[in-house]
Amino acid sequence: MTRGASGQAVFVEAPARLHFGVLDLRGALGRWFGGIGAAAPAPTLLVSARPHHALLVKGEDAERAAEFARRFLSYHGLRGGARVTVHRALPPHAGLGSGTQLALAVARALAELSGLASDAPGLARAVGRAERSAIGTWTFAGGGLVLEGGRRTDSTGAAPLLTRLPFPPAWHCVVAVPDAAPGISGAAEADALAALPPPPEGDVERVAHLVLMALLPALAEADLTRFGAALNAIQAITGRWFAPAQGGTFAPGPSAELVGRMAEWGAPGVGQSSWGPAVYGIVDGEAAGLRLAEHVRAAMSAAGTAGSVYEGAFHTDGARVWQGSLTAPLTPR
């Protein structure tokens, strides 16, 4: 590996990703999946790497991080290794894109040490991610709402980014991750998707219409009421597509309960991220966000449901990268 003379550690902090919905599971037009999503306000993962003659990985989720590091080194034909530390991991199998964000963070750190290109699609290709959804790839690359056009059925490359629109700074998002059954992932996810019946063509057309003529224009005009209505409709339709595998429009139990309650508490837009159990509510203003977060915490406590609740504005950028120490300023590169 080519290393900088300083031998300083490279740090990468990446936000969890929220998946708002998919566009098409039919593939009738030669593209499959597609979707909309955003970088969550929190939680984030933190990875560092420094030059070393061999590959050594420690910290949270170290085994999975080591596998991603080996894939990256092998893909680029690099000899040697690095000291990789996962200082903070994302909740696994919670609908927050923990695998993709960890893979891309490890790959970005190693790319920085090696002097290699670090564009997100290239990193994903090197570590074998974005084989279905590319939402996590594009939220790693930047902030705002991302719309990706689906992977070609004859290609393994990451789906293209169609648009990225910033969220109004006043919009806040509450993310709840109840301790519940983990979302489907890996081989089980592939099997579940293969077993799903194709969604009705009318449903697919309706989702595309909602995205193009309701969701995106509402975001561009900072109209949270219309944005929320479009998001809720998309969640209801696509949730029905996945209901045979997950047992309902939303994952039964705490996830479905919290989605309903957040709507009752006034969140204009609510939903479940991917297979859950992570759910979210979008409101206008910090005060509204803090109130909703307290409602969610109180409801989880009353139900005896453990878990985590996060609140904040949407990220305006993607992963942050810097060299130096863990306490160095978090300045993007």
Image (tube, helix red, strand yellow):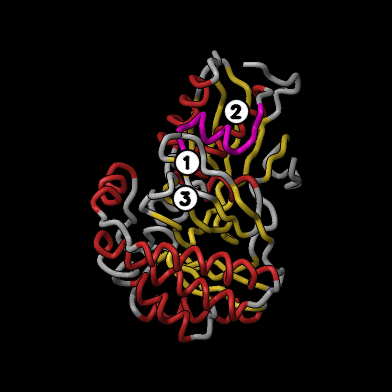
Q: Which residues are magenta?
A: 117-130
Secondary element type, mark 2? helix
* Residue at mark 1: 130
Q: CA distance from mark 1 to mark 3?
A: 11 Å
Secondary element type, mark 3? loop
Q: Is residue 10 above or below residue 285?
A: above
Quadrant in the picture for the C terminus: top right
Is 256 on the left or on the right of 83, as rendered? left
Marker disc for residue 86:
none
The mark that comes first in sequence, 2 or 1, is 2
Q: Nearer the viewer, residue 271 or 33?
A: 33
Q: Is residue 292 above or below residue 87?
A: below
Cβ–Cβ below 8 Å for labels 1 and 3? no
Residue count near mark 2 (Cα–Cα under 10 Å), binned few <14, some 14–19, many ≥20: many
* Residue at mark 3: 97
* Residue at mark 2: 110
Residue count near mark 3 (Cα–Cα under 10 Å), binned few <14, some 14–19, many ≥20: many
Q: Nearer the viewer, residue 11 or 211?
A: 211
Q: Residue at x 73, y 47 (%)?
A: 330
- For the image shown, how many numbered marks are present on the structure? 3
Q: Position of residue 97 (x, y in %)?
A: 47, 50
The mark that comes first in sequence, 1 or 3, is 3
What amino acid type should be assigned to the residue bearing mark 2? Leu
Q: Is residue 240 above or below residue 30?
A: below
